[in-house]
Image (cartoon, grey):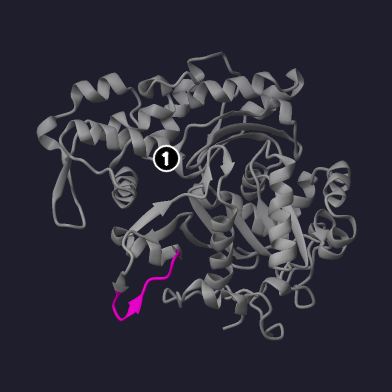
Amino acid sequence: ASASSSRRTHVRRESSLSSVHKYMQGPPTPTGANVTKVTNNDIKEGLPDRTPAFVIDSGSGLIKAGFGTDSRPLTYDAVVGRPKYRRVMIGSRRLGKVVVGRRAQRIRGVLKLSYPVTAGGVQNWNDMQKLWEYAYEDNRAYAMRHPVLLTEQPLTLMKDRLKTAEIFYEEFQVPSLCFQLPQVLGLYAVGNTTGLVLDSGDTTTSAVPIFEGRYDPATVATMKLAGRDITRYLSKLLRLTGCNLTSSSEFEEVKRIKHKMCTTAFNLGTALRDFDVDRGMGYKLPDGKVVKIGLERFQAPELLFNPSLMGREEPGIHELAIQAVAKSRPEDRRQIYSQIILAGGSTTSKGFELRILNSIRRLGSFNKLRISAPDRRAELAWVGGSILSTLSLFDSMSISRADYMEMGSQAFYKKRAQDGPIAEDTLSRSFTNIAR
């Protein structure tokens, strides 16, 4: 199959990272790319003369990666595992020093898991590079062949951007690199350039007002509380019932319990009062033990609205939204409130959409308040990035390796000064012409 083909097989070769160097150069660019041809001048027609971009939404909990011409990305946990014991054999193969990707999740019981990204940013750049290498290997992509679109969070420090650039330009030798905010890409994914993106991932929750494709860093409201904290809180609640899941591999199991069984209550007090304890749901652990999940399924997601449950002095996600829009220009606020987009995996729990709408309404009087909850919220930034990567203006938004090698960090400062918004009519024409 061609490297850029959107046809996927579920069977993936998951060899050790020692083989990943093969994906840094690769064979000549394959032919027969599965690319939809369009006639709009804003889009690179057919893309046969332009290698598809490699789009990476590099989240703290999940990494979504794939070609911009694919229908959806390959997704894996942003976790790195190291053997707990000196000599561990899986089948006939001895584990290497580091295991990432799906294999790390499959054998997590014999691994000590760590997370390269925390709420404070990347903590281990070597591990982060291994995760990006795995993205190339998993997609059978050749780094030197494909331009890259990479997400970065609002208020990312320039030193972190430059470290990322160093890895992609000097280690992977990519031809060009484009940084984009996942919240802006999320808006593009739903066909808008104006709105408020409420994004809650694994380590950070943010409210980003965007007007006509631009965002002002001064208006961004963030809190370092998100999905990973909800998982910790659920683990604490389960311990109170006698269920101790405390190791790094067991923490991943708690995360699965959260995704499968937790519900965001419209009103927590009412949900707890009406809940029949005898109707608690059972969850089967890998060792066969069944854990009964009762009130915890409502209590854990409540943390996002009431951080004081874990002693945190931070606003709830609904208050974060109000704070962000209040810092926007008064003349823009009505239009921003009319398009609130939910993004990130921590907004996908059952009942979240109604709860956030009700919680925001209770904080003020709004002429028009609209919440949009797209189906693929966890992949929303990647979808927007894949759309952007097919536009002709994508090249002008990227920094080539030649410019980086010539100017170094100055290439990014110069680019920041030149960047502008994407016109909404450009996006709308693109959505009309691209069949997805």
Task: Locate residue 308 relative to residue 373 in the image: left or right.
Answer: left
Is residue 91 a member of the stretch shown in magenta?
Answer: yes
Task: Locate residue 353 relative to residue 54 in the image: left or right.
Answer: left
User: Which percent across, then down, holds residue 344?
Assistant: 51, 43
Q: Main secondary structure of the magenta part?
A: loop
Quadrant in which the N terminus appears? bottom right
Please identify the residue farthest to the left as the structure is shown: 278
Residue shown at the point (61%, 58%) measured from the top left: 56
User: Which percent across, then down, holds residue 250?
Assistant: 28, 49
Judging from the image, what secondary structure is the residue with disc 1 in? helix
Is residue 280 a member of the stretch shown in magenta?
Answer: no
From the viewer's side, name the closer residue of 86 and 296. Answer: 86
Counting every numbered tag in the picture gives: 1
Task: Locate residue 194 relative to residue 60 in the image: left or right.
Answer: right
Does any portion of residue 3 appear in the rendered image?
A: no
Magenta range is 90-98
Q: Quick one: label 1, few (<14), some, or many (20+) residues within 10 Å?
A: many
Say above or below: 125 vs 264.
below
From the viewer's side, name the closer residue of 41 and 232. Answer: 232
From the viewer's side, name the closer residue of 188 and 29. Answer: 29
Residue shown at the point (31%, 62%) measured from the top left: 85
Amino acid type for the residue under numbered disc 1: Arg
Which residue is denoted by mark 1 in the rendering?
228
Residue shown at the point (43%, 51%) measured from the top left: 114
User: Which percent across, then down, holds residue 153?
Assistant: 64, 42
Quadrant in which the C terminus appears? bottom right
User: Which percent across, then down, holds residue 22?
Assistant: 61, 80
